[in-house]
Image: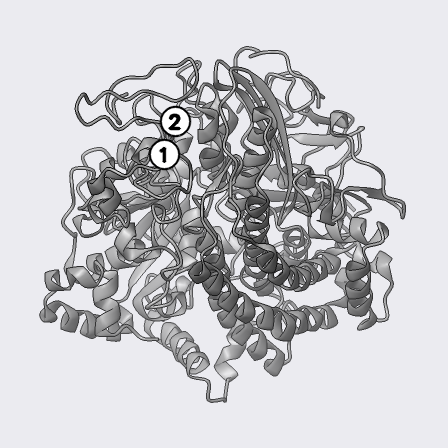
Amino acid sequence: MSLNRRDFIKIMGGTTAAVAFPGVMIQGCKKALEKAAERTNIIWLEGQSCSGCSVSLLNKLNPDIVSVITEHISLNYQGVVMGGTGSAATRVLEEAVKKQRKDFILLVEGSIPTKSDIYCTLGEDEKSHRAIGVREWVEELGKNAIAIVSIGTCAAYGGIPAANNRLTNVNPTGAVSVQELFKGKKNVLNIPGCPPHPDWMVGTLLHLLLKGMPKLDEFNRPVMYYGKTVHEKCERLSYYKKGIFAKEWGDRGCLYELGCLGMDTGCDIPVRKWNNGAGSCTDCGSGCIGCTEKVFPEFGRRGIYQRLHADNTTGVNSSRVPGKKVSGGVING
Amino acid sequence: MASQKVLIDPLTRIEGHLSIEMDVQDGKVVDAKCRGDMYRGFESILQGRNPVDAQQIVMRICGVCPVSHGQASSKCLEDAFKIKPAKNGRLLRNLLLGANFLQSHILHFYHLAALDFVDITAILQYKGSDSVLIRIKDWVNNEFKVKKGRVDELTAAGPFLPRYEGKDFYIKDVATNIDAIAGYVRALDIRQKTHQMVAAFGGRAPHPISMVPGGVTTEPTRERIKNFKSNLKDVEKFVNEIYVGHVVAVAKAFPEYFKLGRYDSFLSYGAFDKDEDRKDFMFEQGLLSGKKPEKLDTSKIREQVRYARYRSGSSLHPLKGETVGDPNKAGAYSWVKAPRYDDRPLEVGPLARIVVAYHSGNKQVKSELNALLKNFNLEVPSALSALGRHASRVIECKLITKQCHEWLDELDSGKTRNSYDIPETGEGEGLIEAPRGALGHWIVVKDHKIANYQAVVPTTWFCSPRDDKGVRGPVEQALIGTPISDPNNPIEGARVVRSFDPCLACAIHVVEGDREIGKFRVC
């Protein structure tokens, strides 16, 4: 179950991207990974999250999650799987702060509430019995971390917890992304997705460990995973080219008219697939919901699903909701 | 002797942010508070959106049981749109939900609960030839060696250590421990296979993509069925040959947990639809206090907020009230509301489903529960306990894996979804059983948009704080009497709470609105 060359290439960007990772890189990888003492510590905190990213990480194959934990990283704190509970757990965080540890990467899953720390707390101060906000932990630990990695769209961009009530245009908790907390800091990067594919998480960590910061796009995402749109590699691309559009869920054809966001979404799922190849969002007939994008789930005022009419000559989209007309582009509608 | 405050904050190895405050006197819990520590405001965020977006958004309430939220939402929208699911759609939903029950239960027993019983350090005494176990043994040894004296010494063999330490906390027998550790590792692989099953018809897991009002978008092609079936066979073998044995082993090592964590009132909405009319279920619908199940009437559900951090009206039907979050409310200690049925707190979840089914005359459930209890010469009342919850999960896994074959056989060449139009106005109710218990979604549609959306979630039922009359929630009540041998390492309390399998992200998600958005029919 150790990481071999093929596995390494696979998590570093899939078989099609093998050329982007020359042999020297892979040799370097093996050498570094063999020295257990050099494995990088990971502290994984959860803010306003659903734990979906944690669960997705557990789906890791090639290498599997046991290998990841025992060979590739050193997982100090992870609320969903860790043995410790209560003070036995928070002691790890307290010590990291107190001893000013600088030997770890901080991973954050979930957004951070800013209207009040009480919206998300973790442990309490021993003396004052004051509940400690997750914001405080993230800021304290982030100061000394080698890098800060936002796991999932909530941590990366705010995601659903940062979305507004459409009637009041107010977000209930003032939820923000992690990069918002660390404005100007250079060592913050994002692995968005709702959830992110386990390969993206482990691959990015290994890149940080072995080669430093991967090449990032304008949204701070590794280009190796988010550099191409879903549409470019879509299983249904040939339908689009032939002008065959699905009219109902699950129909044969390109899913654009049902509101598929594949054209606007950077993600390699149509090639990588989910869960050991068992499925893909576009293949299963309901289309891409744009979950790796900064604007998820808002897409302006459009939201996730919008029935559209593909009219290549005028570029005008009309909604199929009876009595409602919607115009404008996909994202800016 | 004065009581002592004992705190477990955070309670890890659950979904979300939960802490437990206990008053301990003469070594036993005399009072307890269950505190939900995180709030996002999901239902507020839903207002004004396209109703069809709801099922994608509500899945993100919980990453462990998104399938349940997606299906509760789909059913809720179907009710509002006045359509029924296609037959294949219903079957595919059952298969998706079944796979996710397996995922959730296996995760819970092996990866969340087991470390309260199993001694992970026993691996150091492993003398066998299994390459994975040897690798883990070498890893633990190496961790202790290289981290000794280092600034990160405390994290050696993380994330499994550090942990609560004490005499008799963990199983003593080395062989049992090593067998359980091998089970933990095997279960990691089996759990990801259950997610492959979800992805076969759902597109991905977690947060599958294919569930829509009217059914499921995925065609059950031969290839997808084959994929589902081959993983199902592996999971079925694991459940029958390994999981059952480990539950029995834990129960034999800690039989006192048949007497701890007890509760006596239960609710099940009924799990796995047998028809498209939502009337007949694989696990029966009903309430139970005693031996005679009562019929469910959802109009009797109320949510109370005296001890929850909301400054709005209390004891309102989920669809009727306005709810305003108040982080600083005096006397409040949780973000979880207190749902009550006719003023009664109720336990929901696998144990509730199993005992409701048992007393509704479900033959399969009866024979499985009786057979399991026979290992310990116990009768059904002993199952209303912490160990009974673990036993109920494995029984469900046995019955669901079996039933999945039949659902696959029932699939035909017909359509998988019925079409719909979003009406200008409408109201809907969607009830379902999530792995953790009874889950209800309610929607009000106005101007083709969501005017209001509410979810009353399993963990809200059992992790509820005190209600307006000061009556404790089920977890709080179940903790009373639990012995705490060391206030600094209160593992016994953690075991009781974990037996419920709390999911806090689910439990806290309520509306924060500043005005009433319409009048609601109480369903």
Residue at screen point 28% across, 46% down: A236
Residue A136 appears at what percent x and percent y? 38, 37
Label placed on residue A163 = 2
Foreground residue, A79 or B215? B215
Residue B309 appears at what percent x and percent y? 59, 25
- Decide if residue B460 is in sight here: yes
Whether label 2 touches label 1, CB < 8 Å? yes
Q: Tag 2, which secondary structure?
A: loop
Q: Quadrant of the N terminus of chain A?
A: bottom left
Residue B81 placement, left or right of A155: right
Label placed on residue A285 = none
2 and 1 marks on the same chain = yes
B258 versus A322 height, above or below: below
The chain holding disc 1 is A
Three-letter amino acid code of the residue under disc 2: Ala
Foreground residue, B288 or A115? B288
A207 versus B343 height, above or below: below
Colour scheme in the image? one colour
- The residues bearing labels 2 and 1 have C-alpha atoms spaced at a distance of 7 Å
Residue B301 placement, left or right of B132: right
- Categorize mark 1 by other alpha carbons within 10 Å: few (<14), some (14-19), many (20+): many
Residue B190 placement, left or right of B284: left
The chain holding disc 2 is A
Residue occupied by mark 1: A159
Residue B291 appears at what percent x and percent y? 89, 48
Three-letter amino acid code of the residue under disc 1: Gly
